[in-house]
Image (cartoon, coloured by chain):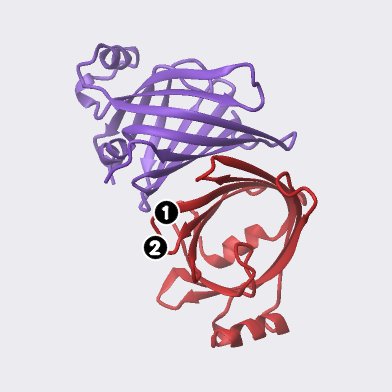
Chain colours: A purple, B red
Amino acid sequence: MDITEFVENSIGRWRSQRSAHHLAFGHFEAVQSEIDIVSLSLDDPAVIDLCQTYEVNPEAAVSPFRMSWEGQSDWEESEAIKGSCVLVPVPDPNHANRGRLLRDQGYAETIAAVGDYYLTEDRTFVLTTAYDRAAAEEKIWFVNPNVRCRVSLIKTSAGTGVVTASFSSEIRQDVKA
Amino acid sequence: MDITEFVENSIGRWRSQRSAHHLAFGHFEAVQSEIDIVSLSLDDPAVIDLCQTYEVNPEAAVSPFRMSWEGQSDWEESEAIKGSCVLVPVPDPNHANRGRLLRDQGYAETIAAVGDYYLTEDRTFVLTTAYDRAAAEEKIWFVNPNVRCRVSLIKTSAGTGVVTASFSSEIRQDVKA
């Protein structure tokens, strides 16, 4: 599986159940949300802008997409969780299953970020992103075309301590025949 | 990584936070538990018995262990979740990273079961177990020596529908220096 196939499989509307484990406190948080993933064209101004921010030649990018989410946490019930970001994969020219992922803002931190991804032999997408004071590691895989799992870990920047581990099960709402 | 190293890394006492997503209902369940994993000797009567049940030569087994757990769910608060089982890996003589895992009773179903495991290149243990009316798929990996993640999926026996997806984050209590 390469990044193009992975993004293609992800396009659509998903209903997500997410559980976050705040490890130091043994606290559980439950989030329900809708996630929309739509593909963008390579000449979309948002894609060109993001490439320029990271001094990447837009011709090196493939399968850009926009992800939007809207949900509700049981922890901060007053606050709707809502956001959107543009993501641009830039494959490594020497390794079909590796590359960088540009993002105009994160959900872990609301700043632009660039992560390193690879796809494992068992079709898991693995993304690591280094922030100033933290590092994020995300694994995403498809159980079938209509069910996606995602595990996200937020670590201290030294990389040894895990602060939050969260798990999402995502069910496709625009079910493929 | 082979199964011997994986079991070795797992031995110890763990504090587990588990979230189960019951997908049809969008229901969240939270379970807190303590898990003890202790190694058994190859001539332990429980190991010999389990090998005989599955007509496996005990000399083909490696790194048998006992797993015990005791916890509390927020769903059925009255009931303590408590159990124990013996697990016996039987590596495939032709593939160092594959084999069968014998178990004297499961936590998905309280009956004996035999599953097929393999270890991926990125050090994830993947176990699939077929039951009469369901199939279970489990992935376990270490984030560091003191943090383990585990994703379990219960599917219909046809294998297409996912009924429950659960995620455990496990923190070592007998921390290694």
Tell me: A140 left or right of B77: left
Expressed as whole percent of the image width and height from the top left, the position of residue A168 reads: 51, 38
**Closer to the camera, B173 or A140?**
A140
Total residue callouts:
2
At 49% across and 54% down in the image, what residue appears?
B123
| Image marks 1 and 2: residues in contact by CB distance under 8 Å | yes
Percent across and percent down for residue B88 are 60, 74
Q: Is residue B58 visible?
A: no
Q: Is residue B45 visible?
A: yes
Q: Chain of mark 2?
A: B
Q: Amino acid at mark 1?
A: Gly
- As measured in the structure, the alpha-carbon distance from the residue carrying label 1 to the one carrying label 2 is 7 Å
Residue at the disc numbered 1: B161
Q: Is residue B176 left or right of residue A74?
A: right
Residue A13: name its quadrant.
top left
**Viewed as shown, does residue A122 lie left or right of A107?**
left
Q: Look at the numbered disc 1 and give the secondary structure of its residue.
A: loop
- Name the amino acid type tagged 2: Ala
Badge 1, how many Cα within 10 Å: few under 14, some, many 20+? some
Residue visible at 30% across and 26% down in the picture: A38
Question: What is the crowding at mark 2: few (fewer than 14 residues within 10 Å), some, or many (at least 20)?
Answer: few
Q: Secondary structure at mark 2?
A: loop
Task: Give the letter of the chain under mark 1.
Answer: B
Q: Mark 2 = which residue? A: B158
Q: Position of residue B7 (x, y in %)?
A: 61, 63
Q: Is residue B148 above or below residue A28?
A: below
The quadrant holding residue A46 is top left
Towards the viewer: B2 or A28: A28
